[in-house]
Structures are given as structure tokens and as C-alpha cells.
Image: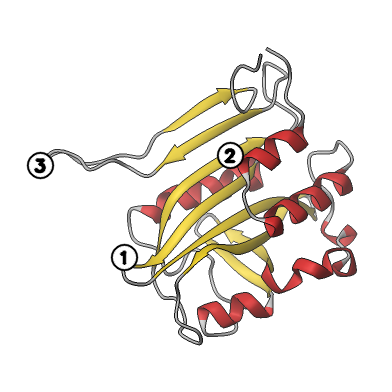
Amino acid sequence: MRAVRATEIATLAMRQPTTQTLYSYWNRLRAGRLAPHRLEIEPSRIAAVLSETFMLQRLHADDYRYRLAGTRLCELFGSELRGHNFLEGWNSEDRPTLQRCLASVCEQGAVVVLALAAGDQRRRLELETILLPLLYGNGISRVLGAMSGVSDQWPAREPIGHRRLLRAELLWPDGRKSGLPQRAVLDAPSPAPAGVSAQRRFRVLEGGLGKRE
């Protein structure tokens, strides 16, 4: 089994041009480090995706405030996102999972890719989100992110409300322990039998996508 390059993992884990573009910029900027510094980010370098880009500040374990948010995102949510907690608007099942994902970003330098949805079968919006660590001060307290529509059947000018998590992937571009890049995949829970609670579980896949011929 050959080692999979960080760029290969990113391309295969992400479907949207916006998330791929932001990941590529972040990966070039860090130049082999755990993460780039917040002050190294130059908006002009990612002008094409700025409207779908945001930045979070970690205040504590359950409070990640928007410091910046692009115009497209503010339109989707129907308000200025600056100052709001990223963890607001999620159900009680998804919120702990998102907290663990964000903790992995800020405490371990992981990259997180999320698939989320809003609406119902009649009107549905699917979004792909990426969360990238940024150094600031004595550690990682900033998160650079982007959110882009995968499928859009959403009425124009109608803000999205509550959303649900479909899938989460944790990527370690430089590998962990074995020296190979790894991905931890979190799938949405399958319906559980009556009286049994469904639980989300991570599984770690070495090399990102397993074996290649």
C-alpha cells in the first residue's frame, strides 16, 4: 500500500470546488507545518471563494464564534453571522459530534470535512463544509472554513434554519503514528431498533482510501 499524498486525500474527500480551493491554499501556506498562522492569510489569494469563506475564534469548548463570514453565507442564514456561535442551530444529537470535530481541529491540527443538510424532501439544501486550523497566539485558536452548496433546491431569499449533520471526516494530512495520512470517518447513524439508541462512531482508515493497485 503506497502512501497517499495530502492533496490526493483532499481531492477525494471533498466534492466542492470551494472547499478544494481553500484546502489547497491552506496546505500550500502551511508548507509542512502543523498549520499556517492567522496573519499569513491573504484574502486576495482566495478572492474567488471569499463569499463562501468564514473564520471562527475558539473561546472555549462549546463556543466557536464567527469572526468573519462571506456574503453568500450571511444570505443563506438570513443574518450577519459575525459574533454568532458556529454550534448554534444544531440538534442535540449533532452538537456533541461537532464539538469533538472542532476540538480535533484546535487540539490536534486535524482538518474536518462536513456534509450537512437543511429542509425536507420537498425542499432540501445540502452543504459541504471544511474546517482548517490556524495558529494564533500560543496555539490553534482560529479556524478557517468554507461552506458550499452540493445540491440546492432551496427557495431564493429564504434563510436556512436548523440543519443536521450527514457525515464528518477528520483528515490528518501529515499522518499519525504510522506516518501515513489517515482519515476518521463518521457516518450518520442508521435507524436503531425500538428501545436502542443510535450512536455515531468514528473509524480510522489508514492511507485515507485503503489499498490501491
Q: Amino acid at mark 2?
A: Leu
Mark 2 and mark 1: span between their CA atoms? 28 Å
Q: Which residue is mark 3?
A: 194
Question: Of the numbered discs in the image, which one, if any, rests on residue 200?
Answer: none
Which comes sooner in the sequence, label 2 or label 1?
Answer: 1
Q: Amino acid at mark 1?
A: Gln
Quadrant into which the C terminus falls: top right
Mark 3 and mark 1: span between their CA atoms? 24 Å
In the displayed structure, does residue 199 sit left or right of residue 66?
A: left
Mark 2 and mark 3: span between their CA atoms? 31 Å
In the displayed structure, does residue 30 sit left or right of residue 144?
A: right
What colouring style does the render use? secondary structure
Q: Residue at x 55, y 75 (%)?
A: 84
Residue 59 appears anywhere in the view: yes
Image coordinates for residue 146, horizontal then vertical, percent: 66, 61
| Label 3 crowd bin: few (<14), some (14–19), many (20+), radius 10 Å | few
Please, what secondary structure does the residue beneath circle 1 have? loop
Callouts 3 and 1 close, C-beta under 8 Å = no
Quadrant into which the N terminus falls: top right
Q: Quadrant of residue 173?
A: top right
In this rendering, the answer to whether 202 lies above or below 123 is above
Q: Which residue is mark 2?
A: 170
Please, what secondary structure does the residue beneath circle 2 have? strand
Q: Which residue is mark 1?
A: 121
In this rendering, the answer to whether 150 lies above or below 185 is below
Please, what secondary structure does the residue beneath circle 3 have? loop
Which comes sooner in the sequence, label 2 or label 3?
Answer: 2
* Closer to us: 143 or 185: 185
In this rendering, the answer to whether 182 lies above or below 189 is above
Callouts 2 and 3 close, C-beta under 8 Å = no
Residue closest to the far left: 194
